[in-house]
């Protein structure tokens, strides 16, 4: 069957981490002026190829956070098989409020 590179799993993990970051703060993505800068601290892959049309389950957990910086670990699964774990660093630039 068709397959692709598992490197795309980093994007899946980063999108999930971004949603977690906004959700925990009770904000929408529009609260960020210039968006979010995401860095890859580490990524460990457990597969060489990723099946096309695979149904993936992604989870993300905050390892620690400080102001607009967060370190998040995400895991991408295909059924019971762990495809990769990724540690990400997220920095978001928020719009200033009237009080600031």
Image (cartoon, grey):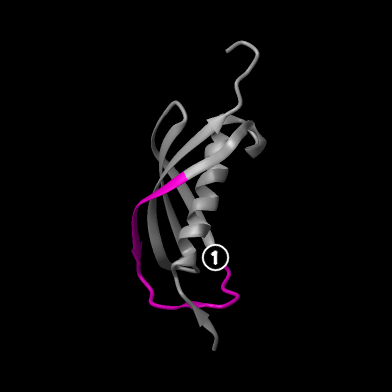
- Considering the image in quadrants, where does the N terminus appear? bottom right
Categorize mark 1 by other alpha carbons within 10 Å: few (<14), some (14-19), many (20+). some
Taking the spot 47% from the left edge, 48% from the top edge, the residue there is: 60
Judge by depth and name the residue closer to the eye, 82 or 15: 15
Whether residue 1 is situated above or below residue 26 in the rendered picture: below
Q: Is residue 41 magenta?
A: yes
Whether residue 93 is situated above or below residue 57 in the rendered picture: above
In the rendered image, residue 57, in percent from the top left (x then y), is placed at 53, 61
Judge by depth and name the residue closer to the eye, 39 or 12: 39
Q: Quadrant of residue 18?
A: top right
In the rendered image, residue 81, in percent from the top left (x then y), is placed at 42, 69
Taking the spot 38% from the left edge, 74% from the top edge, the residue there is: 47
Q: Is residue 46 magenta?
A: yes
Taking the spot 54% from the left edge, 34% from the top edge, the residue there is: 24
| Residue that sits furthest to the bottom in the current view | 1
Taking the spot 63% from the left edge, 39% from the top edge, the residue there is: 29
Q: Quadrant of residue 20?
A: top right
Judge by depth and name the residue closer to the eye, 70 or 35: 35
Judge by depth and name the residue closer to the eye, 86 or 37: 37
- Considering the image in quadrants, where does the C terminus appear? top right
Whether residue 8 is situated above or below residue 90 in the rendered picture: below
Q: Does residue 86 appear left or right of residue 9 in this picture?
A: left
| Residue that sits furthest to the front in the current view | 34
Q: Secondary structure at mark 1?
A: loop
In the rendered image, residue 25, in percent from the top left (x then y), is placed at 56, 30
In the rendered image, residue 79, in percent from the top left (x then y), is placed at 50, 69
The residue that mark 1 highlights is 56
| Residue that sits furthest to the top in the current view | 99
Q: Does residue 33 appear left or right of residue 61 in this picture?
A: right
* Magenta range: 38-55
């Amino acid at each position: 069957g068709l397959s692709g590179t598992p490197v795309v799993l980093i994007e899946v993990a980063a999108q999930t981490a971004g949603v977690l970051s906004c959700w925990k703060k009770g904000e929408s993505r529009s609260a960020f002026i210039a968006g979010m800068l995401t860095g890859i601290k580490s990524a460990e892959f457990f597969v060489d190829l990723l099946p096309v049309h695979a149904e993936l389950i992604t989870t993300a957990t905050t390892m620690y956070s400080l102001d607009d910086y967060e370190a998040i670990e995400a895991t991408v699964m295909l059924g019971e098989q762990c495809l990769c774990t990724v540690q990400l660093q997220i920095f978001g630039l928020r719009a200033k409020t009237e009080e600031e």
